[in-house]
Image (cartoon, helix red, strand yellow):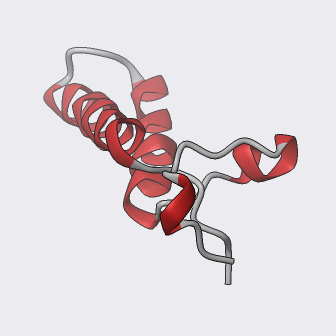
């Protein structure tokens, strides 16, 4: 479907930041804007980022790229 373009450390950071934003929102520490954490969480879990595709960026190692 979509090319994998999020790899390694980028993926870990996306999942962590997204999860922390959602957790902070659910705990009431930050406002409703924290639901934006769904975006980095989803792109980290799915290993594809539409913005990266648009600009031709990839953080995956060269030998593991898939189309």
Q: Quadrant of the C terminus?
A: bottom right
Would you identify the image quadrant in which residue 52 lies? top right
Q: Residue furthest left?
A: 27
Relative to 50, say whether 29 is above or below: above
Specify the farthest residue to the bottom: 1
Q: Nearer the viewer, residue 35 or 56?
A: 56
Looking at the rendering, which quadrant does residue 24 occupy?
A: top left
64 vs 49, nearest the viewer: 64
**Residue plotted at (72% across, 41% down):** 57
Q: Residue at x 31, y 16 (%)?
A: 30
Front in this rendered view, residue 16 or 11: 11
- Name the image quarter holding the N terminus: bottom right
Q: How many marks?
A: 0
In the shown orientation, is residue 36 left or right of residue 24?
Answer: right
| Coordinates of residue 31 in the picture (x, y in percent) | 38, 19
Seen in the picture, residue 4 relative to 11 is either above or below; the reply is below
Residue 41, image x and y in percent? 39, 48
Coordinates of residue 50 in the picture (x, y in percent) = 72, 53
Q: Residue furthest top?
A: 29
Left or right of 3 in this view: 42? left
Residue drawn at (54%, 42%), measured in percent from left and top? 59
**Residue 37 x %, y %:** 42, 37
């Amino acid at each position: 479907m979509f090319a994998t373009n999020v790899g390694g450390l980028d993926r870990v950071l996306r999942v962590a930041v997204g999860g922390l934003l959602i957790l902070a929102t659910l705990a009431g520490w930050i406002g409703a804007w924290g639901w934006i954490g769904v975006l980095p969480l989803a792109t980290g879990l799915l290993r594809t980022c539409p913005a990266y595709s648009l600009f031709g960026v990839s953080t995956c190692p060269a030998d593991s790229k898939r189309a």
